[in-house]
Image: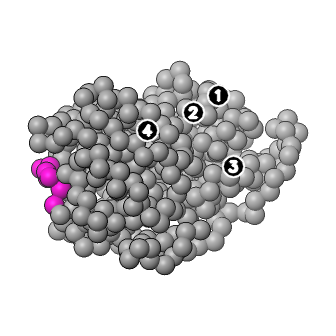
């Protein structure tokens, strides 16, 4: 664990500051080494409800992603359970749907163990998993091995596919290739006002490795110089060497996929060292108001983030009639917290799962998987239809953090060239304020 004292006079964000309180949500984790064919029907045969397993990073470094569960889970199920649930032919009746959330603690190893426990001990009928490759990939691998139909999201397609191909898992999110096009479009509006020297912040995890590969190829192919300091570990207390390298190489644009505490450390240290890039586009860390607020002062102003979902996205659930606007408003009213992007995707993942169960009309795992295969559904994040790799790409627009009216910082949509159906809500700021 990194030293929690200040290093070289810098204000550091420590692991403790970002860890959430809370214990395990779900049963104790077991590692029973049994094969699917040996698992008896057990609880699944006795209970009078459908059970969906939901591994979720409720605590730990990526807990901002998991914050919206179980609120969003319950809301997605609300309409269908109000009608008595889903008709299951072999039971001859409607059965309500319940969700069991199990905390992965933001740990990939634990995510796999949690998924195994949900399948072998809790006898779930289906799995829903989201929130970065650190959660989605290990759970998807377990579901494929144990033949459990699974809906996943909130992890870039390329990163998810690194552990594929999959037979039992189906995934909806955007691609890093599309993200690189989005950022190039945003930066390109001011290409004549920068030296096109880019510095990458890519950690040693599935996201970082994919980002480094895709962005390096795409940027060099479009006339940018890429300065890559190499992969680094999470919870990095001191970015001095990277900042010095960026300064010496003349970096004016920063980009990366980095956890909130690491980005806070980097950005604070950059300003303390008088290193001021003209643009910074940060995935993962800048997706959440809590991470933006943690920067303090005006350090968040103008920071670029991709937007996967917002209250302004013009999509509607064909399952429940919910709109992006009504979902975000309900969240803010019920919790007193600002909307976040995972809201729409958690809701949409359950839309897909419920739709497959409705069409399957059975708890037979193979039939549920076949229903997922033929999904073609309009959801809160757009149309979900899986391709041969079991992927469905969702739209991206670009935004920037600006001082808000309702909330201290608000993420405005400033670029929508690839998806003009999603309206802009603000004008782009260039260069970044300092």
Q: Which residue is mark 4?
A: 212
For the residue carrying disc 4, how many other residues have a C-alpha within 10 Å: few (<14), some (14-19), or many (20+)? many
For the residue carrying disc 3, how many other residues have a C-alpha within 10 Å: few (<14), some (14-19), or many (20+)? many
Q: Quadrant of residue 294?
A: bottom left
N-terminal label among 4 and 2 = 2
**What span is in magenta?**
425-433
* Residue under the point 52% across and 69% down: 15
Could you tell whether 310 is left or right of 30 in the image? left
- Mark closer to the observer (1, 2): 2
Could you tell whether 127 is left or right of 157 in the image? right
Q: Which residue is mark 3?
A: 112
Q: Which residue is mark 2?
A: 162
Q: Which residue is mark 1?
A: 167
- Mark closer to the observer (4, 2): 4
Classify mark 3: helix, strand or loop: helix
Classify mark 2: helix, strand or loop: loop
From the top left corner, tell me how far across and down residue 309 is, in percent: 33, 47
Inspect this view and state whether residue 355 appears: no
| Inter-mark Cα distance, 1 to 3 | 17 Å
Closest to the observer: 69 or 429? Answer: 429
| Inter-mark Cα distance, 1 to 2 | 14 Å
| Inter-mark Cα distance, 4 to 2 | 14 Å
* Residue under the point 54% across and 24% down: 389
């Amino acid at each position: 664990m990194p030293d929690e004292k200040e290093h070289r006079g810098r204000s550091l964000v420590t692991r403790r500051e970002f860890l959430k309180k809370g214990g395990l949500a779900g049963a104790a984790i077991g590692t029973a080494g049994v094969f699917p064919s040996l698992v008896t029907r057990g609880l699944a045969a006795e209970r009078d409800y459908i059970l969906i397993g939901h591994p979720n990073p409720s605590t730990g470094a990526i807990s901002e992603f998991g914050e919206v569960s179980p609120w969003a889970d319950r809301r997605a199920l609300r309409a269908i359970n109000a009608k008595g649930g889903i008709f299951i032919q072999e039971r001859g009746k409607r059965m309500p749907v319940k969700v069991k959330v199990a905390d992965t603690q933001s740990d990939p190893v634990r995510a796999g163990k949690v998924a195994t426990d949900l399948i072998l001990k809790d006898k779930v009928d289906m799995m829903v998993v989201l929130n970065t490759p650190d959660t989605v990939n290990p759970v998807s691998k377990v579901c494929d091995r144990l033949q459990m139909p699974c809906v996943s999201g909130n992890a870039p397609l390329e990163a998810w596919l690194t552990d594929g191909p999959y037979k039992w898992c189906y995934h909806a999110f955007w691609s890093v290739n599309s993200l690189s096009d989005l950022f190039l479009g945003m930066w390109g509006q001011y290409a004549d006002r920068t030296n096109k020297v880019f510095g990458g912040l890519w950690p040693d995890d599935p996201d970082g490795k994919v980002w480094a590969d895709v962005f390096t190829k795409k940027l060099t192919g479009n006339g940018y110089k890429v300065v890559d300091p190499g992969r680094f570990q999470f919870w990095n207390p001191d970015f001095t060497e990277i900042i010095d390298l960026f300064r010496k190489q003349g970096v004016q644009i920063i980009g990366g996929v980095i956890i909130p505490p690491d980005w806070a450390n980097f950005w604070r240290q950059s300003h303390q060292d008088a290193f001021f890039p003209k643009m910074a586009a940060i995935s993962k860390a800048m997706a959440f108001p809590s991470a933006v607020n943690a920067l303090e002062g005006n350090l968040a102003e103008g920071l670029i983030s991709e937007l996967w979902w917002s209250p302004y996205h013009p999509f509607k659930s064909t399952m429940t009639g919910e709109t992006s606007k009504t979902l975000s408003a309900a969240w803010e009213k019920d919790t007193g917290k600002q909307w976040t992007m995972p809201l729409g995707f958690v809701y949409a993942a359950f839309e897909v799962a419920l739709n497959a169960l409705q069409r399957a009309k059975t708890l037979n795992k193979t039939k549920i998987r076949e229903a997922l295969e033929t999904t073609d559904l309009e959801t809160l994040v757009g149309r979900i239809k899986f391709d041969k790799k079991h992927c469905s790409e969702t739209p991206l627009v670009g935004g920037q953090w600006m001082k808000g009216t309702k909330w201290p910082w608000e993420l405005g949509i400033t670029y929508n060239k690839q998806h003009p159906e999603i309206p802009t809500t603000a004008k782009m700021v260039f260069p970044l304020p300092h």
